[in-house]
Image (cartoon, rainbow, N blue to C red):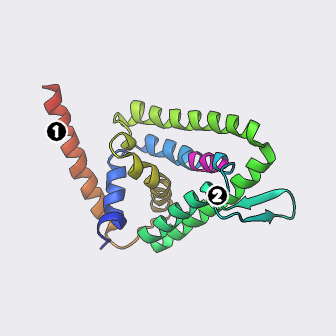
Amino acid sequence: MGNCGLFDLEKHFAFYGAYHSNPINIAIHMIFVWPIFFTALLILYFTPSLFNLKFSLFGNDVFLLFNFGFLFTLIYALFYICLDAKAGSLAALLCAFCWVASSFVASWLGFSLAWKVVLVAQIVCWAGQFIGHGVFEKRAPALLDNLIQALIMAPFFVLLEALQEFFGYEPYPGFHENVQAMIKAEMNEWQEKKQKLLK
């Protein structure tokens, strides 16, 4: 099953999974990936509105702005739905929640404080992930090989991993088995390349 190319979930998941096979590293990513997404939206709240539209939130001074944060959220949400209707819809809802919540937090903090909070959060979250790779995975992060794919797939990967781990969910029968076979093949290839470099 699965689509080809851009919406090939097995291929995307196997690519990301090959860099995240250690349980501790996966757990670290589950903790830090969504806060990275949230704080990215938080700082993007201060970008100019694209359509000169805004909606008041809860009837106070908090506004939902149709700016780069909204565009960012929309792209991620639609891409996840295209990858898998069920888990993708849940991921899209999480993206929308992050957009609304980050708008509220950004309005409350104001730019002068928000950028400092975002900077600290991003440093802590990225440092945690690099430690996960360096100490536990013992493999460089996926973003060093494919930055765009890694950044776009990360939130969906950790969500799908959690759904599979805790609820036994898979997009269709055989998905997990197919992906594991692809991950194993890719990791074997990586190990062979590493051995050749060491010789």
Residue 197 % position (x, y): 17, 29
Residue count near mark 1 (Cα–Cα under 10 Å), binned few <14, some 14–19, many ≥20: few
Residue shown at the point (25%, 45%) measured from the top left: 187
Residue 3 % position (x, y): 32, 71
Regarding residue 176, the answer to whether it shows in the image is no
Residue shown at the point (87%, 60%) measured from the top left: 60
The answer to whether the residues at label 2 and label 1 have Cβ atoms under 8 Å apart is no
Residue shown at the point (45%, 54%) measured from the top left: 152
Regarding residue 122, the answer to whether it shows in the image is yes
Q: Count up the numbered dots.
A: 2
Residue range highlighted in magenta: 36-42
To which quarter of the image does residue 195 belong?
top left
Earlier sequence position, callout 2 versus callout 1: 2
Q: Identify the residue at the far right of this view.
A: 60
Q: Nearer the viewer, residue 168 or 151?
A: 151
Q: Nearer the viewer, residue 153 or 78?
A: 78
The residue that disc 2 covers is 67
**Of helix, strand and loop, which one carries label 2?**
loop
- Give the main secondary structure of the magenta stretch: helix
Which quadrant of the rendered structure holds the N terminus?
bottom left
Residue 20 in the figure: left or right of residue 52: left
Residue 55 in the figure: left or right of residue 128: right
Q: Is residue 138 above or below residue 172?
A: above
In 3D space, how far apart are the residues under numbered discs 2 and 1 (Cα atoms)? Answer: 46 Å
Residue shown at the point (50%, 58%) measured from the top left: 159
Residue 161 % position (x, y): 45, 56
Q: Amino acid at mark 2?
A: Asn
The residue that disc 1 covers is 192
